[in-house]
Image (cartoon, rainbow, N blue to C red):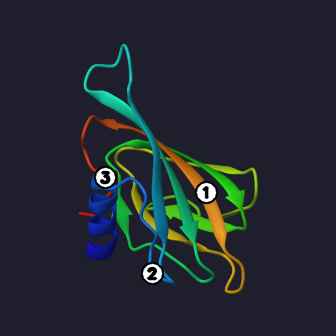
């Protein structure tokens, strides 16, 4: 968890980070203030899982819309059903959700998805789960 938080914090300072082999790579693509919604911003991130890659349990304190670009990913929020998503499929996480499962469904192929956040301006996209 700490690794993911540190990576996201570093990435917010440096827009293009290439993660070490075998780790999840997160690339910030765009961040814009949302007109008409004071104090909120939209942020778009590209998330790339290596084969067998995963995320620790975490939360976002944001509305997060996920769109799978490549491969298959397994997602689940606490109290929700575990789902396997393929190219073109979507997933949603609400501000109060705890993301308990997030991993590449394949041990041999990479997976890639876009995550669009509606969050507090300047807040990091990932927080430790409580």
Q: Dot 3 corresponds to which residue?
A: 12
Of the two numbered discs 2 and 1 on the same chain, state the one appearing first in sequence.
2
Q: Residues within 10 Å of mark 3 (few under 14, many from 20)?
A: some
**Can I make out residue 127 in this image?**
no
Specify the label residue 20 is tagged with.
2
Kindly give the residue lying farthest to the right in the view shown.
87
Give the vertical position of 50 relative to 90 (above or below). Answer: below
| Dot 2: element | loop
Picture quadrant of residue 48: bottom right
Give the vertical position of 110 relative to 124 (above or below). Answer: below
As rendered, which of 110 and 86 lies closer to the eye?
Answer: 110
The quadrant the N terminus occupies is bottom left
Q: Residue at x 61, y 74 (%)?
A: 104
Mark 2 → mark 3, Cα distance in angstroms: 18 Å
Q: Residues within 10 Å of mark 2 (few under 14, many from 20)?
A: few
Residue 85: percent from left, percent from top:
69, 61
- Quick check: 30 left or right of 88? left
Q: Residue at x 31, y 52 (%)?
A: 12
**Can I make out residue 62 in this image?**
yes
As rendered, which of 53 and 16 lies closer to the eye?
Answer: 16
Q: Dot 1 corresponds to which residue?
A: 113
Mark 2 → mark 1, Cα distance in angstroms: 18 Å
Of labels 1 and 3, the one closer to you: 3
Of the two numbered discs 1 and 3 on the same chain, state the one appearing first in sequence.
3
């Amino acid at each position: 968890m700490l690794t993911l938080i540190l990576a996201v914090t570093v990435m917010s300072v440096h827009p293009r980070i290439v993660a070490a082999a075998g780790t999840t790579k997160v690339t910030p693509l765009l961040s814009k203030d949302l007109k008409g919604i004071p104090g909120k911003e939209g942020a778009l991130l590209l998330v790339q899982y290596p084969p067998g890659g995963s995320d620790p349990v975490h939360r976002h304190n944001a509305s997060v819309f996920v769109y799978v670009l490549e491969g298959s990913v397994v997602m689940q929020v606490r109290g929700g059903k575990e789902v396997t998503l393929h190219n073109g499929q979507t997933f949603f996480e609400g501000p109060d959700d705890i993301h308990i499962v997030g991993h590449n469904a394949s041990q041999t192929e990479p997976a890639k998805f876009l995550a669009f956040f509606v969050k507090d301006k300047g807040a990091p996209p990932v927080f430790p789960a409580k």
